[in-house]
Amino acid sequence: MALVLGLTAACSDDGGGGATTKGGDDGSPKLTISPADGSGDARPDAGVTVTAAGGTLGQVSVKMKGAEVPGRLSPDKSRWQSTWTLVPGAKYQVSATAASPKGKSTTATSAFQTVRKTAATKITNVVPSEGETVGTGMPVFVQFSKEVPAKARPGVERAIEISSTTPTEGAWRWLSAGESFNGLPSAVFRPRNPWKAHQQVSLTVHYAGLKIGDSVFGAKDVTRKFRIGDSHTITVNAKTDRLVVKKNGRTVRNWGVSLGQGGDRQADGVDHLLTTSGVHLTMDRSRMERMRPPGKKKGDAGWYDEQVPWATRISNSGEYIHQNMDDPTCLGDRNCSHGCVRSPAGDAQWFFGWAYRGDMVTITGTKRSLEWTNGWGYWQMPFEKWTKGGVLGKPVTTASLNA
């Protein structure tokens, strides 16, 4: 079972395609199905509604391409409503029965098609990847081709099902293209506390049929399943120049590092040679990363252009855990880098192959703080403030997923 964050269904018995009514004579119950039989312009966001007057509903079946469409029956069995919105341009078949207290019955059917007008705003990706194993700090990204209109966002949040082996409290926050790590507008789920290790997570966005703009609807649903792996925690101390790696609470490796030396405060007021302190997350990795200083060009003071191996990104401002390419005496002794976490070659290579995306890297002891919009710096924001960035403004708890 997956957590239904909110039902997205019809608010009216008229789904833009009228209604079909049967019965109601000689004591038989009156059955009404919306959209009507033969409709070719049913609104996807209105869903399917079946009602019974003078009796109670028995069997209700709604199918699309032979698959049953989920729905809910009211406690008094007088109304059935599809759980989610419908797929644009799809054909549906409905059959229903109702019985009166005196035993008289009515059967009604409807076959209809929804309108085809889909929105230009589409879900382009979900992060993590399908089947990926990630760290306990990993956010979940639903990324869009364009900004989702404000009036459509409540429907999108309600149309998300998220479940995990261990129920986990978290919250959604909307990020603009300028706030997003890769320039794509996103809805991002962040747990209140790190995910429990060794569990499965499943996400479905019931986007098909959601009203996104004037008379245009979401194109299709998106589903993603991934796994939370071992608990990996990495701490880096700029005062002692040591990095400590723990797996499931046990120290498995540690080594001397060299962090940012500082001394390059640019027009934006930021010293770009200082490593940022705060809770980072491991992001992408590069076997060989080309590194150049931000805001500089060839010939400027402080210019460099280097190919650096075994680079694991931890922010968008050019910070990596990577192999040391300069004075080895700096490692474990003093800060000589351009802002990255320089490491011995063997340790950098080991970390490159060992870390998941979403592992938590906590750096302390520098005079520059990690901004929450820098890469995946979301753990820098208090959870209560994070929650206010969602249009529903409240946390949710994932349902229990039978792994």
Image (cartoon, rainbow, N blue to C red):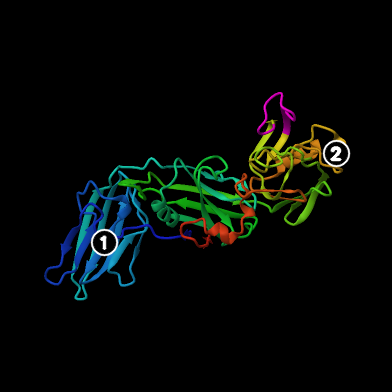
Q: Quadrant of residue 68?
A: bottom left
The image's mark for residue 330 is 2
Q: CA distance from mark 1 to mark 2?
A: 73 Å
SS at mark 2?
helix
Q: Quadrant of residue 49?
A: bottom left
Q: Is 174 located above or below residue 100 in the figure?
A: above
Residue flagged by tag 1: what amino acid is it?
Answer: Val
Q: Is 375 located above or below residue 47 in the figure?
A: above
In the figure, is residue 393 to the left or right of 353? Answer: left
Q: Earlier in the sequence, mark 1 or mark 2?
A: 1
Residue 11 seen in render:
yes
In the figure, is residue 322 to the left or right of 393? Answer: right
User: Label 2 crowding class (10 Å Cα cut-off): few <14, some 14-19, many 20+?
Assistant: some
SS at mark 1?
strand
Give whichever of 379, 60 is nearer the camera.
379
Residue 80 at what x, y percent from top left? 30, 63
In the rendered structure, does residue 25 fall within the stretch colored magenta?
no
Residue 164 seen in render:
no
Give whichever of 179, 166 is nearer the camera.
179
Numbered label tally? 2
Residue 77 at what x, y percent from top left? 30, 69
Q: Residue furthest top?
A: 299
Residue flagged by tag 2: what amino acid is it?
Answer: Cys
Q: Which residues are magenta?
A: 293-309
Name the residue tied to disc 1.
50
Tell me the mark number nearer the camera, choosing from 1 and 2: 2
Q: Quadrant of residue 294?
A: top right
Q: Residue furthest left?
A: 26
User: Label 1 crowding class (10 Å Cα cut-off): few <14, some 14-19, many 20+?
Assistant: many
The image's mark for residue 21 is none
